[in-house]
Image (cartoon, grey):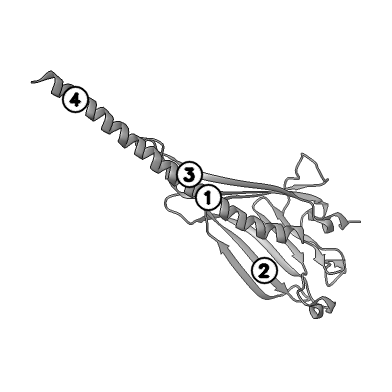
Amino acid sequence: MNLGIVTSYIIAGVIILGIVMMNFRVQNSGAELTLSQMNRQYVTDIADMLNDDLSNMGYNVNDVTRNPETGDIRVMDCAQVNRIRFFRNLCETDEECADETRIPERIEWRLLTEDEISTTNPNQRTLQRTVTVLDEENNVVSEDISDINIGVTTFDVQYYETVGSNTNITGLGCGSNVPSVRQLKVTLEVQSRERIAHRASDEGRFIRSVWEKRFTPTNLQLQNN
């Protein structure tokens, strides 16, 4: 066999293999970039809603939300790691704002930790936002539930007794020690549904986007004051 032909085949094979590997890396880089952009957009959309809800907790036009039965300040009534529930009373028209009998809505954000929504990424869960309208006796009048199924893997809320503290409160629940909260930090993570591998033999990894923010709602500072 001609040694020159054999050498040519070997060199051609090496070049073709290099081209295939380069194309593989380029395709994966493009896919990773696309998934990263999608995740960042998902995180931004959810963060916009959280910014609006959490910053306005306890808002009640010219006052702070109160228990309709006792008149006591009632801003937050549930403070858990994956769940937060609070009251607010936003109005859109002058007529609504002038209605002093209007009962504040109850807003809840909750990660359904037992609810797997993806067969390819077992970490993804449903993030649920619920808006509840109550009557003066705390009976449910209506409930609007929105399920967010766009790859949320973490919704973690940490609570602090003092603004700027590095030590969070543990063991909180619904109705237990909630008035002591002055500040909270939310951590939100979104992961891609599919894995991205950098090598053909690699299992790959999920693309992650993380958002964190501390909130110091004005009306939380009024509790127990």
Residue topped by disc 2: 131
Residue 206: give its label: 3
Q: Earlier in the sequence, mark 2 or mark 4?
A: 4
Residue at 78% across / 77% down in the picture? 93
Residue at 75% across / 76% down in the picture? 135
Is disc 4 surrounded by few (<14), some (14 to 19) or many (20+) residues within 10 Å?
few
Q: Earlier in the sequence, mark 2 or mark 3?
A: 2
- Quadrant where the C terminus is found in the figure: bottom right
- Front tag of 2 and 1: 1
The three-letter amino acid code for the residue at tag 1 is Gln
The three-letter amino acid code for the residue at tag 4 is Ser
Residue at 48% across / 44% down in the picture? 206
Is disc 3 surrounded by few (<14), some (14 to 19) or many (20+) residues within 10 Å?
some
Which structural element holds mark 3?
strand
Residue at 72% across / 67% down in the picture? 106
- Front tag of 2 and 3: 3
Residue 36 in sight from this viewpoint: yes
Residue 122 in sight from this viewpoint: no
As drawn, the residue found furthest toward the bottom would be 95
Residue topped by disc 1: 37
Q: Which of marks 1 and 4 is nearer the N terminus?
A: 4
Q: Separation of disc 4 and disc 3 at Cα?
A: 41 Å
Q: Separation of disc 1 and disc 4 at Cα?
A: 43 Å
Residue 150 screen position, x and y as percent: 52, 57
Query: Which of the two residues, 29 or 81, is positioned nearer the viewer here?
Result: 29
